[in-house]
Amino acid sequence: MVERGLEEFFESFLRRESVFFDKKVLQSTYTPETILHREEQTKQIANILAPALKTEKPSNIFIYGKTGTGKTLTVRHTTQKLMEIATKENIPLRVLYINCKLKRSADTEYRLIAQLARELGKSIPPTGLPTEEVYKTFFKALNKQKQNHVLILDEIDQLVIKTGDNVLYNLTRINEETESQVSIIGISNDITFVDGLDPRVKSSLSEEEIIFPPYNALQIQSILKQRTEFAFNNGVLEQGVTEKCAAYAARDHGDARRALELLRVAGEVADRKNSKKVTIEHIDEAEEKIDRDRIIEVVSTQPKQYKLVLYAIISLQPGRKNNIFTGEVYDIYKSLCKKTNTSILTQRRVSDIISEFDMLGVVNAKVISKGRYGRTRDISLEIPEGTFPKIKNILEESINI
DNA sequence: CCTCCACCGGAAAGCCGGGTCA
DNA sequence: TGACCCGGCTTTCCGGTGGAGG
């Protein structure tokens, strides 16, 4: 009977042994006791921030390095320690951490300032007020509690791309308008990002600069070792497993986060297969799975118009030696719109949608010139061949073609 | 060497749905 | 209630442009 089977399943699930001892340790939110291979950067940050303890204003810091190089982790760790001392010694100091990429929370000028004001105990409606008004409330809040502030702006490049450097200009000038002092720590993935900034903002923001270089394979290995000790049960990792994870990640610009994820998913795969050990094959499988899951996740959460565009591309792809051009996609897209009773977007817009898919890594779209026959994007799918039908299905179901 | 195709991509402006405030 | 604000998505307008073919 079905019921009986289910019960058994859950019971055996409960009793099943896992390769994990504590899976949390592998998650990116986990903060380890010590941060490996970032001693130098930690020291620099500490040095710069230390004056805050004597109620002097620390310099602004600009931090850059690729994803998974421990920027956020290191900054949070150091400021946390700083706060511990400050509270113990009763020094007026406050650390505000804001991730500028968080959708609908801090990704525009209004929302960022509103978020900051909220952190200081003001209540700001999510929309409706003039931005100017929000600034005023924020400044007032700063003035009321006279103390040093350290403002951490994570993924600051995203903010500037979306809203321009106006916000930063205003923020760097806070100290001229208020009693309290604010130091800014900007964190960015994009190294070239400061170059596009207003010179005044640039010089003020990057009074100090700290670079986080990618980890090399050996360093990633030791990071993984540090975590696996607590994450996995004794001896479940087959010989060479951490080494392989490290090698994968190092090949991909030293991204420790990815290495940890790979290890975690490999463990999950092993569990699901009822294996007592995590093997090298599990890692290969995990890599594939991460890839596949990411694409499916991306595709299924797109808005309708995006899905139509992608569907147009997918139905053009099979059995083609040459790649696909914007014009063709647009034609198919138009007919799809008619079939599904959807309003037709302009080619300009569709062109943008295609390049968004490019940035998401679903599609590869380079601008090429066909000489006499014009200029266009050269589009090809980045989806592994095997997932084609599945993706197609997802699209068809969600837009009923 | 010049032309001219078939789009690219920046700028600006419009529309709409969310909201505040007096 | 009307004036006004924000932000996401689009459209409109339009000045480029790499390179095959003449």
Image: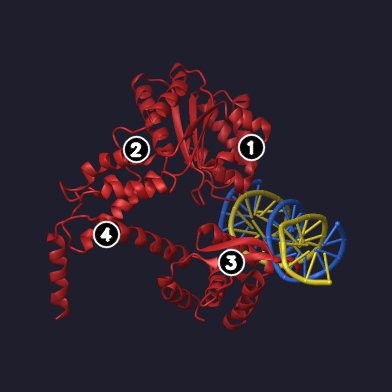
Chain colours: A red, B blue, C yellow
Q: Which residue is mark 2?
A: A219
Residue C20 percent across, percent down from the top left = 73, 68
Separation (CA) of disc 4 from disc 1: 44 Å
Residue A221 percent across, percent down from the top left = 31, 41
**Closer to viewer: mark 2 or mark 1:** 2
Total number of numbered discs in the rendering: 4
Q: Earlier in the sequence, mark 2 or mark 3?
A: 2
Q: Earlier in the sequence, mark 4 or mark 1?
A: 1
Asked which secondary structure carries label 3, the reply is strand
Task: Let me know if residue A338 appears in the view.
Answer: yes
| Left or right placement of residue A328 versus residue A29 in this view | right
Circles 3 and 4 on the same subunit: yes
Asked which secondary structure carries label 1, the reply is helix
Three-letter code, disc 1: Asp
Separation (CA) of disc 3 from disc 1: 31 Å
**Closer to viewer: mark 3 or mark 1:** 3
Three-letter code, disc 4: Glu
Residue A105 percent across, percent down from the top left = 50, 48
**Residue A226: quadrant of the picture:** top left
Three-letter code, disc 2: Gln
Asked which secondary structure carries label 4, the reply is helix
Q: Which residue is mark 3?
A: A379
Circles 3 and 1 on the same subunit: yes
Query: Pointer 3 and pointer 4: residues touching (CB < 8 Å)?
Result: no
Q: Which residue is mark 4?
A: A281
Which chain's residue wears label 1? Answer: A
Separation (CA) of disc 4 from disc 2: 23 Å
Which residue is rendered at x = 48% and y = 24% of the image?
A147
